[in-house]
Image (tube, rainbow, N blue to C red):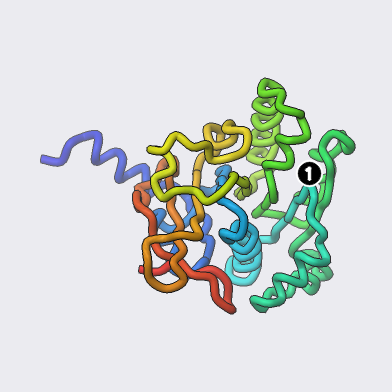
Amino acid sequence: MTPVRSFFIRVEEKMVERIKTNIPGFDKHMDGGFVKNSLNLVSGGAGTGKTILSLQFLYEGIRKNNENGLFVSFEEDFDNLIGDALVFGWDFQKLEKEGKCMFLSSKPLEEPNLQAQMAELIRKHNVKRVVIDSISIFSMMFKDDQYRVRKEFYKLARFLKAQGCTILLTAEISGEAPLDITASGSSLSRDGIIEFIADTVITLHNSGIGGEGDRAIRVLKMRRTNHTKGPVSMTINEKGMQVLS
């Protein structure tokens, strides 16, 4: 006899609407993709591929799902970012001209109308995918005021979900994240707060579990999802990120 709890968990999983990342090999590790309108954190040290994953999420969403994107940065030089993306064949300059992917640079403490600017771009261009790179800079702007950081994170999360978007945030950590980062007690972001607010937490690792490229990706948590629990090998090649079997 099937336990009642297990039955309802399976029914709920089938009813959850998914947003495919379209990153080769990745979606199958999280029941088909991100939960629609969810807040998803990608955390890792320098050079682990956070921005590549973010750009690929936007580009493939436009190309394969006709879901327009918005990339928000608190520090990025977009000319360099767009130039770097061309290495993988992702022409964001063309997508920007077509109104399919917009880029917004802002400093929250200097720009009080950030949410209004984002809301206008989301409405005008029918944006369904939003990337914020990096949320670590956002928290640093509040000068270690933990109460203010938590309050602003909750405000930002509520606002973005209200726009009907699926959100991907990146967060930097110092050094290389161990594969068992939760067991080590290490924070998944510089502030140690956003990982508790996010619906999903994904970590990227330069030192993986062996094999091609010796990189790894791990889904630490994902609400309403029966995801792969351990680290999975991944590589970054001329086409972008690919998660290996």
Farthest residue to the front: give it. 175
Q: Is residue 144 above or below residue 240?
A: above
Residue 22 visible in the snapshot: yes
| SS category of the residue bearing label 1 | helix
The quarter of the picture where residue 11 lies is top left
Q: Residue at point 62% right, 49% down?
A: 170
Disc 1: which residue: 119
Q: How far across and down, in percent of the image, does residue 159 sit?
A: 70, 36
Residue 124 visible in the snapshot: no
Q: Is residue 102 above or below residue 141?
A: below
| The C terminus, quarter of image | bottom left
The quarter of the picture where residue 155 lies is top right
Residue type of the residue flagged with mark 1: Ala
Q: How far across and down, in percent of the image, does residue 142 sit?
A: 76, 29
Q: Residue at point 59% right, 45% down?
A: 174
Farthest residue to the top: give it. 147
Q: Is residue 118 above or below residue 58?
A: above
Q: Residue at point 58% right, 70% down?
A: 64
Position of 105 with respect to 223 (left or right) is right
Position of 96 with respect to 9 (left or right) is right
Q: Is residue 68 above or below residue 220?
A: below
Q: Residue at point 24% right, 41% down?
A: 7
Q: How far across and down, in percent of the image, does residue 106 sit?
A: 84, 45
Q: How far across and down, in percent of the image, does residue 184 sit?
A: 41, 38
